[in-house]
Each structure stands twice: as C-alpha cells, then as structure tokens.
C-alpha cells in the first residue's frame, strides 16, 4: 500500500498472463476536464458562484467523510456524484468555479456531465430578474397627490411591519425587496410616480384609482335670522324753587384769576349755589333752595333723544318735564351659502379683517411697550366640512358666525398707555356663533341653533310720600320702563349635487333671488345658464312653478300663463325678432323692460324702446335676453 505495488505469486506458466493484465489495467486514464463560460444577464455572478461552491463543496466533503484514513484526503479532491453526472470524469475531476466581476460571468472547470448540471442550475437562477420593476406616472383627477402619496406610503409601511412581526426570520431579502413600493407625489402636475414589482404593481394601481374616484359636491345653505325688539317708556318731572336772592348772587366769578362759570342763573336746578359777591348779594342774609333731581336730563343717554321736553324757569322757579315712548324693531337676515367637495373644508367670509391687539412686548432699551397686533375676521362667516355617508346622509362639522367689531372710543377697552400717555385701546367684538357636528338628510332643513333673550328694566325715582300721591305725585317722580327682546335662529339646508341638471336648477333659483339686470350681467360675463339637455326618452322636460322646484315630482305642476303677444298695444307695428348676443346685431340706445318672471324665458320677448338702429329680421336661436321685451319709446 505504501509503494502502490502488487506482489504476485503464481505458477511460472501463468506469470506472463498476469503481467500482461496488470500492464493493461495500469494504463493512464482518459479523463479530460472541460471548461465553460457562463454570462449572466439577471443574477449576480458572485452570489451565484458562492451558492454553487457551498452546494458542491458540501457534496464533495460528504463523499470524503464516508472514507477513512488517507483515502479521505484523496477523495476530497475528486468530482461529484449526482444524478445526470455518472461519467468517470465528473466523478474524478474536481469542480472549480471562478467569477469575472467585470463581465458578470462565471468560469467553471470540471467533467462534462457535471458542467451540464451546473449550467442547468445557472440557467434557472438567471431565468427571471428579481430586480425588474414597473414604473409609471399616474395623473390624479380629483385628489391632491401629496395626500394620496402619504396615505399609500403609510398603509404599505404598516402592512410591511405587520408581516415582519408575524413572520420573524421567515421573510428573506428577496421577499422584502419584492414588497418595496415607491410612491412619490409630483405637485406641479398633481401626479404620482409609482415604482413596484410586477407582483404588486396592479394592486397599487387599483388602490390609487379607488382613492381618486369622483367626489360628490354639497351645497350648504345657512340662514341666520336675528330679531331685536326694544321698547322704552319714560316720564319724569324735576322741580326747583329758590330764594330770588340766590339769583342775585349768580354770575361769572373769577377765582384765582380763572373764570368760573359753574354758578347758577336761570338754570339753577342741579347747580351749586351762587357765590358772586356783588352789591345785591346781601351776604348777611340766608337764602334757601329746594330741588328734586332724578338725573332726568333733556335726552335719553342710550337713545340719544329725549322725546317731549318741557322746561320753564325764572329767578325763583325751574321746571323740567320729559316724556318719551320709543319702539324699535330690527330684523337681520343673513344667508351665507357655500359649495364644497365631500369631506373638504368650505369657508365663506363676508365682512372685515380687523387688527386686534394680542399682547405686548417691552423694548428694554427705550422702556417702551410695543403692542402685538393680529388680524381677525368679522362679519358673516360660514365654515363647514361635509361627509356623505353611504346611505345618503350628510354629516357636517359646521360653524356659523355673525360678528361685528365696535371700534369707536365709547365701546372699546383701554388696555394700557404708551410712553406719551396715549391710551392703547382694543375693540369689542359682538358675536353670534354656533359650532356643532350634525347628521342631516339630503335637502332637509334643520335648526342648527338659536337663542331667545328677554330683558326688562323698571326704574322708579321719586320724592318719598309726595311721589305716591295720586295724580299730583307725578310731579315728584321719574318712571322708566325698558324692555328688550333678542331672537336668533340659524337654519341649515344641505343639498347633494347629483347631476348637472340639479346644478342648473340651483343656479337658476339662486339667481332669481337677486336684484340685478340679467342682460347686463351676461353682457359682462357671458351666458349664465346652460341649455338643458334633451331627455333621452323624448319626453318634454317639466316646467317648475315658482317655489315648486323641491316639491314632489309626481305631483302635477301648475302651467305657466301664456306670454303676451309682442306689440299687442299697437297691432300696426310688425313684431320685432328676438335679440341675440352678437354685437353686430346689437341695438344701441335701447331701453328694456322685463315683462316675465325670471326663469320663464320660453315664450317672453323683448321689445325695443327708443332704438337708434332697427334690427333686421333673423332666425337666430333665442337667448336668455328673450326674458325682456322692447317697447317703442314715446316721441
């Protein structure tokens, strides 16, 4: 064994035969190794080489592990024993693999059949590109791209975290790479840049399409009704009696070089005693005075007027009588209206943006107080976020407000003074506001909120005992009664815009509430109303009477009266054709008179008054200007 020799013992005549057989078996083996080059298109050559070396080296080591002694070291250099590689060269020639990174290829050396097995494995590993991804630019129609991208990214991240936690150690790099989806928002075109593997690409597109579905629109109409009722009744008398000597002591006195005019004269009631020292003063005599003072005044301090005021006076008597009865009714109707998409905030503000002091900062160097100013909205404000439920109801987060800032000095509040001693004031805000979250059926009117407040004030001022005497006691008293009642109700009506026809109906109804000249508005803006689409079944579209648009469609509507014949007052004048919007056919200097109600433009006509140019007969299609009629101007 040590010398790899054979010792043969046999008869002499057989030794020659045995020697010939040994020489025949001891010939060099005809085993030739083959070399092959594999270029990979999809897989990474280094990774595939590492995988094959691990696979075949373990197989070779397994073969050698079954041998013993020195045969183990020898067999570790032998080939592989696998199905499909049974030839001698594959079993004896060891398999070697090398990688060329520059060309992403593998060079293999080994037996022919062993290389065939390696080639089959490499082809399977290089069959598909796991890094292949689909990319697209998806243009959104309705939703903002940034919001959609954020939502999808958060959803995919949550899904990935859940899968990782549930299958710890079971999710490989390939599966993690396959699940990676990239969604980026492009703000300029409102598009999404999507990159995903083919496995998840279609699912992501379906999610985006569902998120970007057409959203319904909602028109929210609010009505703020405010009523204020106030009633003021006042009657009072003030009397003054004094000694005529006090009248002699009246006049303008000079005290300390300063003229003092607060001395009584004829109007001595509610004034201090005279203090003029003259020849008629008779300062050694005592002069008396008797007054009844109730702060009656000549006018009501709140209303600014006094009603009936009677006054009389002499040097000894002063009388003031005032009687007032005032009733005031204020009705305020505010009707804000806003249209917004489902689950989107809508806000309308008609009013003022007022600067308001929010705080103060101290200037340490100069020791001055500098006010911090913010701006606040006031007026009619309506904010609403509607959400349409699957059953057709509308859930709304709504805030309705009517407010006003009182900026005059009488109603403002003094906060502090500046370095020069000037007062820094803040206006007072009167506000009526309701904030709520409600659920309303489509086209249902509800009361969102309301307040009814009543205040009554009774004032009685009198001279004791004398003021209680019947009839005569009115000369010694002052009575005032003030009552004030305020009422506030907020109505709300949401309507879902289901189709274009409903959109046109709402537009016509709202336009009919305005006081404007329709022809002038169309001349400036263009057509305001769209022509209704003909019914698909060939039926005649319904004509809604005034106020009947929201009624039951199954009820029979009241037909409109026929329009008057053109030029019915003068049958000798030929009829004038309808006007068109074409400037070439326009009439200069015409006076227009509306003869039909707004919205009933099917049969009404327009007649010319004082036109400087006669329109030529034409067969052009009638326009919205047919709601008017022109008459001949008096000459």
Image (spheres, grey):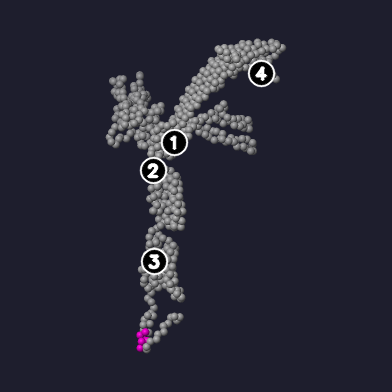
Instruction: Identify residue for label 3.
Output: 118
- State the separation of the CA atoms marked 2 and 3: 53 Å
Instruction: Identify residue for label 1.
Output: 438
Q: Nearer the viewer, mark 1 or mark 3?
A: 1
Q: Residues within 10 Å of mark 1 (few under 14, many from 20)?
A: few
Q: Quadrant of the N terminus?
A: bottom left
Instruction: Identify residue for label 2.
Output: 213
Above or below, 569 against 219 in this view is: above
Q: Do tag 4 and tag 3 residues touch (Cβ < 8 Å)?
A: no
SS for callout 4: strand
Q: What label sits on residue 260 in the rendered view?
A: 4
Q: Quadrant of residue 337?
A: top left
Q: Nearer the viewer, mark 2 or mark 1?
A: 1
- State the separation of the CA atoms marked 1 and 4: 68 Å
SS for callout 3: helix
- Determine the residue positioned at 35% across, 29% down: 548
Q: Earlier in the sequence, mark 1 or mark 4?
A: 4
Q: Earlier in the sequence, mark 4 or mark 3?
A: 3
């Amino acid at each position: 064994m040590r010398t790899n020799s054979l010792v043969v013992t046999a008869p002499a005549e057989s030794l020659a035969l045995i020697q010939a057989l040994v020489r025949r078996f001891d010939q060099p083996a005809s085993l030739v190794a083959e070399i092959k080059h594999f270029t990979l298109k999809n897989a990474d050559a280094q990774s595939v080489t590492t995988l094959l070396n691990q696979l075949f080296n373990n197989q070779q080591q397994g073969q050698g592990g079954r041998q013993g002694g020195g045969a183990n070291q020898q067999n570790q250099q032998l080939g592989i024993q696998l199905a499909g590689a049974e030839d001698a060269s594959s079993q004896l020639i060891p398999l070697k693999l090398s990688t060329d990174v520059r060309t992403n290829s593998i060079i293999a050396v080994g037996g022919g059949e062993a290389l065939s097995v390696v080639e089959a494995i490499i082809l399977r590993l290089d069959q598909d590109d796991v890094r292949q991804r689909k990319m697209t630019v998806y243009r959104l129609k309705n939703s903002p791209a940034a919001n959609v991208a954020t939502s999808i990214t958060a959803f995919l991240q949550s899904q990935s975290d859940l899968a990782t936690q549930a299958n710890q150690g079971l999710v490989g790099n390939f599966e993690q790479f396959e699940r990676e989806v990239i969604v980026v928002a492009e703000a300029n075109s409102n598009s999404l840049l999507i990159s995903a593997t083919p496995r998840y690409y279609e699912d992501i597109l379906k999610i985006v399409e569902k998120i970007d579905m057409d959203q319904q629109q909602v028109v929210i109409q609010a009505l703020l009704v405010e009523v204020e009722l106030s009633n003021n009744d006042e009657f009072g008398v003030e009397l003054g009696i004094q000694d005529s000597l006090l009248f002699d002591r009246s006049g303008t006195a000079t005290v300390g070089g300063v003229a003092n005019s607060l001395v009584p004269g004829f109007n001595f009631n509610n004034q201090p005693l005279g203090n003029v020292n003259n020849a008629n003063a008779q300062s050694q005599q005592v002069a008396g005075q008797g007054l009844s003072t109730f702060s009656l005044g000549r006018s009501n301090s709140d209303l600014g007027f006094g009603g009936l005021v009677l006054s009389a006076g002499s040097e000894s008597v002063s009388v003031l009588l005032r009687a007032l009865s005032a009733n005031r009714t204020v009705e305020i109707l505010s009707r804000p209206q806003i249209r917004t998409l489902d689950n989107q905030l809508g806000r309308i503000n008609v009013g003022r943006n007022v600067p308001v002091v929010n705080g103060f900062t101290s200037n340490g160097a100069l020791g001055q107080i500098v006010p911090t100013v913010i701006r606040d909205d006031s007026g009619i404000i309506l904010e609403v976020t509607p959400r349409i439920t699957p059953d057709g109801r509308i859930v709304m987060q709504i805030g309705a407000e009517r407010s006003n800032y009182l900026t005059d000095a009488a109603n403002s509040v003094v906060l502090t003074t500046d370095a020069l001693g000037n007062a820094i004031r803040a206006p007072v805000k009167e506000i009526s506001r309701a904030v709520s979250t409600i659920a309303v059926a489509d086209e249902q009117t509800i009361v969102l909120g309301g307040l009814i407040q009543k205040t009554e004030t009774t004032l009685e001022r009198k001279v004791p005992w004398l003021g209680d005497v019947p009839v005569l006691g009115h000369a010694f008293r002052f009575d005032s009664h003030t009552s004030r009642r305020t009422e506030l109700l907020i109505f709300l009506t949401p309507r879902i815009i289901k189709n274009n026809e409903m959109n046109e109906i709402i537009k016509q109804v709202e336009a009919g509430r305005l006081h404007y000249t329709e022809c002038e508005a169309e001349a400036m803006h263009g057509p305001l109303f769209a022509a209704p689409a003909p019914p698909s079944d060939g039926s005649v579209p319904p004509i809604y009477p005034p106020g009947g648009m929201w009624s039951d469609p199954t009820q029979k509507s009241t037909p409109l009266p026929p329009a008057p014949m053109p030029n019915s007052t003068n049958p000798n004048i030929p009829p004038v054709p309808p006007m068109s919007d074409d400037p070439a056919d326009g009439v200069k200097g015409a006076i227009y008179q509306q003869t039909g109600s707004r919205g009933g433009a099917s049969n009404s006509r327009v007649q010319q008054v004082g036109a400087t140019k006669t329109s030529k007969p034409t067969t052009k299609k009638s326009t919205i200007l047919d709601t008017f009629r022109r008459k001949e101007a008096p000459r």
